[in-house]
Image (spheres, rainbow, N blue to C red):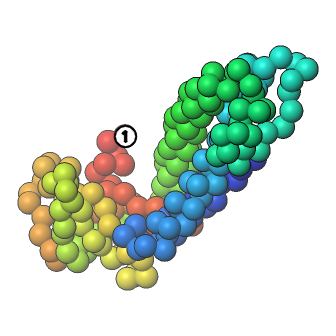
Amino acid sequence: MFLNSLGMYLAFQNWWTSESASPAPIFILLLYAGICWIGILFLSIMISQLIMLKQDKKSFISLFSLFSKNDYDDHFGANAKAMNRSVQITSFGILIFSIIIFSSAMQLVKNYQLKKYELLEYAKIQYISTDVKGNEYSYIEYNNRKSSSTILTKSYSNNKKQINSGDSIKIIYSSQNPEIVELYSNFKNK
């Protein structure tokens, strides 16, 4: 539980630190996801041992024992296959639960930051790009050109006129953490 919580905390702290397209933050977030996954595996092993094994056969098994078939079979005997399936099912459940908790926490913090430390500003669109799914993203500069971000602007262009590079759009961002930014029209409609 500690490794899962630590990985989620570190990812949470570094979520808005830099541009999303930069490889360094992506690598760091993947590292934190790896820490979470190791924690999830340890937790699922412990839960599976509680479910599958009798009280007198419980002992600590390391994550590395899962990679050695002989050690795994020696440790669990006839229950090895059932234990392996139990670990897989438990890990998947804990992973889904962790993702839901992480995304909910991120949304709560974003809404809290934007409501408590809100600053409204018209940001200038530097350029517009489209991802693989056809979503329009605009690279904007704001906070007296001290901050920049890429935000989804497809919903803005559907409700208003077509947007182009050089246009200004109304945004809301946090004065405490300027990396938390959203279109004002999207935030107002929540």
The image shows residue 71, relative to residue 18, as above or below, that is above
Q: Amino acid at mark 1?
A: Lys
The image shows residue 11, relative to residue 71, as above or below, that is below
Q: Position of residue 82 (x, y in %)?
A: 63, 21
Q: Position of residue 39 (x, y in %)?
A: 68, 46
Q: Quadrant of residue 171?
A: bottom left
Between residue 34 and residue 178, name the one nearer to us.
34
Q: Which quadrant holds the C terminus?
A: top left
Between residue 133 and residue 47, name the one nearer to us.
47
Q: Answer yes or no: is residue 86 visible.
A: no
The image shows residue 53, relative to residue 12, as above or below, that is above
Q: Answer yes or no: is residue 85 visible.
A: yes
Q: Circle 1 is placed at which residue position?
A: 190
- Report crowding for label 1: few under 14, some 14 to 19, many 20 or more residues within 10 A (C-alpha): few
Of all residues, the one furthest to the bottom in this rendering is 145
Q: Is residue 50 left or right of residue 40?
A: right
Of all residues, the one furthest to the left in this rendering is 162
Residue name at image x 27 percent, y 71 percent? 139
Q: Position of residue 126 (x, y in %)?
A: 23, 77
Q: Position of residue 100 (x, y in %)?
A: 52, 37
Kind of element beneath mark 1: loop
Residue name at image x 46 percent, y 61 percent? 180
Q: Is residue 30 left or right of residue 51?
A: left
Residue name at image x 12 percent, y 69 percent? 164
Q: Which quadrant holds the N terminus?
A: top right
Residue name at image x 24 percent, y 62 percent? 137
